Image: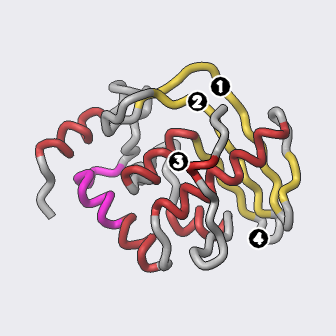
Amino acid sequence: MKQSKILDNIQDQMKPGKITLSGFLGNDDRKLIDILTEDDAKVKRMDLSHEEIAQKMIYFKDKGLKGLGEFIKVPPHFEVRVDSVRGKIPCPFGDPGVFKKINTTVKNLDKNMEITYTDLNIHMIYAHGFYEGKGSDFRLEPKKIITTLEIKSSDFDYNLTNRKED
C-alpha cells in the first residue's frame, strides 16, 4: 500500500532522537502504513478491535493505580503494578496534549506471562492502531497483549467515557 505524505511526516517524527531517544520504530524498516496494516490484520484475525484492547489496558491500569507502585492482586489471577516516571511525552501522530510517563505492568499468573505498557501505548493503540515498530523498546505484539490480558470482545466492555482521570 502506498504511504501518504502525512504518514511520511509522522514516521519521521518516530525516528530516534526526535521525540524519544530510541524512537518508536526499533529496527523495523517498513513504511508506517505497512506496520499499521499488518497489526490491524492481526487484531481483526482475533476478532477484536484496537479500542477493545485499549479498554482492557486501561482497566488494568485503573486497578493498579490503587497499589501505589506495588503489585496488587486483580482477580481472578492477575497482579498489576503502576509506576510513574517524571515527565510527559507527546503523541508522534501529532495529537493534541501530552501523556504522563506512566508504566503499567500486568502479570498473568495462570499463563506465566507479563507485559508492560505506557499511557502513550494505550493512546496510540486506541486512536491509531499503532503498537510500535518491531525491535522498539515499547513494542507490544497484539497477540501477546490479547493473550496476557485475556481479552475477549464478547465478555468485556470497560466504559472509557465514565473513567475518572488522574
Q: Could you tell me residue 78's position as x and y percent?
A: 81, 60
Work out which residue is located at the far top of the displayed protein and give it: 86
Which amino acid is tagged 2?
A: Lys
Label 4 secondary element: loop
Q: Mark 1 points at which residue?
A: 85
In the depicted structure, whether residue 162 falls above or below residue 82: below
Toward the viewer: 164 or 13? 164
Q: Mark 2 points at which residue?
A: 101
**What predominant SS class does the magenta segment belong to?**
helix
Which mark's residue is nearer the viewer, 2 or 4?
A: 2
Range shown magenta: 28-38
Which mark's residue is nearer the viewer, 3 or 1?
A: 3
Q: Could you tell me residue 8's position as x and y percent?
A: 18, 42
Q: Distance of mark 2 from mark 4, alpha carbons?
A: 27 Å
Q: Name the residue under label 3.
A: 122
Q: Name the residue under label 4.
A: 111
Which amino acid is tagged 3?
A: Ile
Q: Distance of mark 1 from mark 2, alpha carbons?
A: 5 Å
Label 1 with label 2: CB-CB less than 8 Å = yes
Task: Give the residue drawn at x 69%, y 46%.
Answer: 61
